[in-house]
Image (spheres, rainbow, N blue to C red):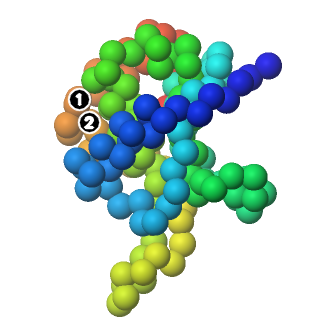
Amino acid sequence: MKQFIHAPSIEEMCKEIIKEENIDIGNAALGCFLVTPYVSKTIAGQCVKTNDRLRFFSTYDYIIEMSESVWKELDEVKQRILCHHELLHIHVVRDENSGEVKKYGLKDHNIKDFREVIERHGLDWIDTLSDLGATKI
């Protein structure tokens, strides 16, 4: 049975990355969790946009889940890259005139990974996840 463990240290890492990389998440509330043993056997991490039902039971607009079996094998640099990757799935649609948030959504990869992550860290970081059995991010 899967367990979801609230991970304030990952939330803090994500806040740092949001600030450093100037990632627009609007006023969205973000929750981060380790899923033990894993999200799925092939998924290192995922970003989930909550629906009305999930928001009823939590205060989060987005939930980032990391497979504990993968996360604990990554060094901090790779953990930050994985967090950066998952944060880039957050899609904020703003009104062109007022700049106010119109809606939240999820962004798909613009290539195998996000261009921003590849430009900054290269594509080889994904090999580390593959070596640990995670074929999807």
Residue 29: % across, % down: 52, 56
Checking the image for residue 122, the label placed there is 1
Spatial CA distance of label 1 from label 2 is 4 Å
At 59% from the left and 33% from the top, the residue drawn is 6
Tell me the quadrant of the picture where the N terminus can be found. Answer: top right
Q: Nearer the viewer, residue 125 or 61?
A: 61
At 54% from the left and 61% from the top, the residue drawn is 105
Kindly give the residue lying farthest to the front in the view shown.
8
Residue 88: % across, % down: 40, 48
At 74% from the left and 23% from the top, the residue drawn is 2
Horizontal relation, residue 71 to residue 98: left or right:
right
Count residues near mark 2 (Cα–Cα under 10 Å), then give few for <14, some for 14-19, many for 20+.
some
Q: Is 94 above or below relative to 57?
A: below
**At label 1, which amino acid type do we have?**
Gly
Secondary structure under tag 2 reads: helix
- Can residue 111 be seen by looking at this rendering? no
Q: Are marks 1 and 2 in contact (CB under 8 Å)?
A: yes
Checking the image for residue 118, the label placed there is 2
Q: Nearer the viewer, residue 92 or 15?
A: 15
Kindly give the residue lying farthest to the bottom in the view shown.
97
**At label 2, which amino acid type do we have?**
Ile
- Can residue 16 be seen by looking at this rendering? yes
Horizontal relation, residue 111 to residue 1: left or right:
left
Residue 23: % across, % down: 32, 55
